[in-house]
Amino acid sequence: VSYELYYWPSIQGRGEFVRLALEDAGADYVDVARKPGGVETMLKFMSRNPVFAPPFLKHGKLLVAHTAAILHYLGPRLKLAPKSESARLRLHQQQLTIADWLAEVHDTHHPIGNGLYYEEQRAESLRRAREFRKNRLAKFMNHFEALAGEPFSYVHLSLFQMIEGLRYAFPLTMKKMESKVPRLVALHGDTAKRKRLKIYLASPRRIAFNQQGIFRHYPELDA
Amino acid sequence: VSYELYYWPSIQGRGEFVRLALEDAGADYVDVARKPGGVETMLKFMSRNPVFAPPFLKHGKLLVAHTAAILHYLGPRLKLAPKSESARLRLHQQQLTIADWLAEVHDTHHPIGNGLYYEEQRAESLRRAREFRKNRLAKFMNHFEALAGEPFSYVHLSLFQMIEGLRYAFPLTMKKMESKVPRLVALHGDTAKRKRLKIYLASPRRIAFNQQGIFRHYPELDA
């Protein structure tokens, strides 16, 4: 049975962390909402099932929502995680920390609420982004720098995506910061060279970063 | 081997969701940081191990961080979750949605950053709390209202805690909202009557809500 991924079709967003795992593993999957009429299919499914938000994955009868839970489920099945409970739990914790990190990236441009445009919360974004750049970013980077030597897993794919996204959103900040996290930078470079991933990244299946996603480039937030 | 929970000793915070599960199950556990010198023990452990933030749980050689991951691990062991992977995953997703909800509650009084006092981000808090009350709170409540009839699990204990905390933080808002989520209100009441939980809630082990925790009562945010 092939995997069915449900996520917004026009952004990388949270769904991209799942796409990277499926693509790197060469898994048989359908990116449902990117098919014609797919968004309607996704919304209809959500209205009838207990899903709070995309992304979610269907695999046979199983339904899994939340990026980190999806990767926890897929990990051993895609050979991107060991099978033992302790090793899986260890990776899952790391993925949950990445989820928190990603939420903080999102909130740099949406500190007041999802229901408002960036332009309606620009003043607050300037403050929040400053706090993120000055205090939070290094804390997350240093945490994962210490873990960067571990055996390859889906967590590496997610860290690759974090670095990609942060370089897009905060190029000046990252330029200053990267020399302090050489192992993380090397992990990013090594991951980008993986055979199937490289093909995916160059394909039209890889949506470009844009100003509707989680990683957005507002120069004033990177000052 | 008894469980060792590590969390800040003066607040309910995220650790309370784990405490409720351990207490309701009558589990043998130590709340390490509440012992004399315990905070130092916790901080020392964190400096030597890959833990991003409390709470974390030690069980023999196993180390689990992140509230939802801890409950995922404890669930079947405490008989607060079934043993099948699909059932466990289903509860885990719900707990991850609760984690997101809780983070949004936290951000009503800290929309700019953890490193600043509430008083330094009061103006932004007024806006963020308004968005939360108007748009987000009902979305989460309705989601769980639809799930409130499921068999008892650690998720029920966490929903009990959400209702408790929201009543403390947003009494006026909750008064208006509760009639719309009768099943969730009933779930809260039924849970509060559980034998071991009731004893715990009346004991000194239950820390009172206070203005350092995640649920805080600032009347201006409940207007």
Image (cartoon, coloured by chain):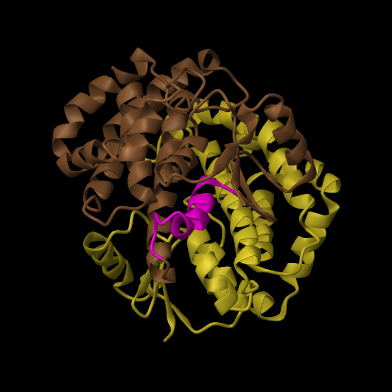
Chain colours: A brown, B yellow
Residue drawn at (63%, 78%) of the image: B79
Position in image of residue B205 (x %, y %): 53, 74
| Residue A212 visible here | yes
Where's residue B163, x and y in %?
69, 54
Q: Nearer the viewer, residue B164 or B147?
A: B147
- Write the start and end of the magenta stretch as one range: A65-82
Note whether A8 is above or below B188 in the view shown.
Answer: above
Q: Position of residue A123 (x, y in %)?
A: 45, 16
Q: Residue furthest bottom?
A: B1
Residue A202's quadrant in the figure? Answer: top left
Residue A174 painted magenta: no
What secondary structure is the magenta-colored segment mainly?
A: helix
Q: Is residue B203 visible?
A: no
Query: Which residue is drawn at the image coordinates 60% and 20% (left, top)?
Result: A116
Q: Verify whether residue A67 appears in magenta.
A: yes
Answer above or below: position of B68 versus A36.
below
Residue B159 at x, y percent in the picture: 67, 58
Give the quarter of the image for residue B128: top right
Q: Residue at x 71, y 80 (%)?
A: B195
Report the residue at 59% width, 38% height from top.
A30
Give B48 or B176, whichever is nearer the viewer. B48
